[in-house]
Image (cartoon, rainbow, N blue to C red):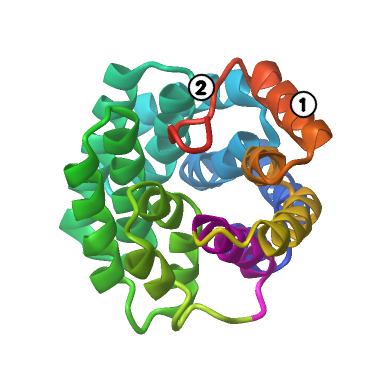
């Protein structure tokens, strides 16, 4: 059930994945299968993060980390949303602590399913801290680490690509479009936003607006209010005032602000 939910989270959508995880958590809890339950809770954290249920995610994440003794992938899964919440709420020290710990575990494993999101988190935190070169270093490392891995390369179409665009490294941003195309729900939402950011950076405002609008709709279907807000910000920069107001309302509800200066 945990693996099924993990697949659904990428290929189908976060709402369906969450239903599966919650069934699994209930099954495990009723039978006292603690280890399985904690794994299921840890992986479900991405649903809480993208749904904007950040206070619940912080509480859940803290409980899961307290239970973990030996690190490993579960620690990475638990720390990823916590790093994202802290960095968006302006707690750079908290975000850095989470990101460093999760990247250490990800590097030990060498597994792309934890290494790619780990590097992405470090790049986001470095970018928020104004450390442009360090952020780009992680993004460049991601370009190498994800080559030939279609599933994990598409994960680079959000924060890493936005960081590259914001830094003016358009060719690096475009490189993530190569070898990432497939039919998952995540990719169908991420790619229009990625193409929009590149089109905007090249001055093609009308094309970017259409792509940002598509991305916002697809992220809503997928179940990510966070990424929907970033797409709406992009649409707002292309002249849609209502999109800007909608994005601001989402970030206000989260008690957050967009990380990248370009998006802000």
Q: Is residue 241 above or below residue 215?
A: above
Label 2 sits on a secondary structure element that is: helix
Q: In the rendered structure, does residue 184 fall within the stretch colored magenta?
A: yes
**Residue bounds of the magenta highlight:** 183-201
Q: Position of residue 142 (x, y in %)?
A: 29, 63
Q: Nearer the viewer, residue 195 or 117?
A: 195
Tell me what residue is drawn at x 55 percent, y 56 percent: 197
Residue at left offset 30%, top offset 45%: 123
Lateral position of residue 208 relative to residue 123, left or right: right
Q: State left or right for residue 84 relative to residue 253.
A: left
Quadrant of the snapshot with the N terminus: bottom right
Residue 223 visible? The answer is yes
Instruction: Identify the residue under disc 2.
Output: 58
Left or right: 24 as drawn, with respect to 149: right
**Foreground: disc 2 or disc 1:** 1
* 19 in magenta: no
Q: Main secondary structure of the magenta part?
A: helix
**Quadrant of the rendered structure where residue 49 is?**
top right
Q: Based on the displayed image, in which of its 4 quarters is residue 128 positioned?
A: top left
**Relative to the observer, which residue lies in front, 173 or 81?**
173
Please rate how many residues cluster around mark 2, counting C-alpha atoms within 10 Å: few if below 14, some from 14 to 19, many from 20.
many
Image-based side of 63 in relation to 14, left or right: left
Q: Residue at x 16, y 56 (%)?
A: 108
Q: Position of residue 263 (x, y in %)?
A: 53, 37
In this picture, is 46 found above or below 257? Answer: below
Q: Is label 1 in a helix, a strand or a loop? A: helix
- Residue under label 1, please give it: 245
Q: Earlier in the sequence, mark 2 or mark 1?
A: 2
Q: Residue at x 56, y 27 (%)?
A: 57
């Amino acid at each position: 059930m945990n693996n099924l939910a993990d697949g659904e989270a990428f290929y189908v959508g976060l709402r369906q994945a969450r239903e599966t995880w919650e069934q699994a958590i209930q099954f495990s809890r009723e039978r006292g299968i603690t280890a399985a339950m904690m794994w299921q809770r840890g992986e479900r954290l991405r649903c809480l993060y993208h749904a904007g249920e950040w206070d619940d995610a912080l509480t859940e994440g803290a409980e899961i980390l307290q239970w973990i003794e030996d690190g490993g992938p579960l620690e990475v899964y638990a720390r990823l949303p916590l790093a994202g919440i802290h960095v968006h709420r302006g707690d750079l020290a908290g975000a850095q602590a989470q990101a460093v710990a999760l990247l250490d575990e990800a590097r030990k494993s060498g597994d792309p399913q934890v290494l790619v999101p780990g590097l992405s988190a470090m790049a986001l935190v470095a970018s928020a801290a104004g450390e442009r070169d360090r952020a780009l270093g992680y993004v460049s490392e991601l370009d190498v680490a994800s080559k030939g891995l279609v599933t994990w390369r598409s994960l680079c179409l959000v924060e890493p690509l936005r960081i590259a665009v914001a830094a003016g490294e358009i060719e690096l941003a475009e490189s993530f479009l190569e070898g990432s195309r497939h039919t998952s729900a995540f990719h169908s939402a991420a790619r229009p936003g990625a193409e929009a950011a590149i089109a905007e950076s090249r001055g093609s405002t009308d094309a970017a607006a259409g792509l940002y609008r598509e991305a916002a709709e697809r992220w809503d279907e997928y179940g990510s209010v966070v990424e929907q807000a970033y797409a709406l910000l992009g649409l707002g920069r292309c002249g849609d005032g209502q999109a800007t107001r909608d994005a601001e309302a989402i970030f206000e509800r989260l008690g957050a602000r967009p990380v990248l200066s370009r998006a802000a």
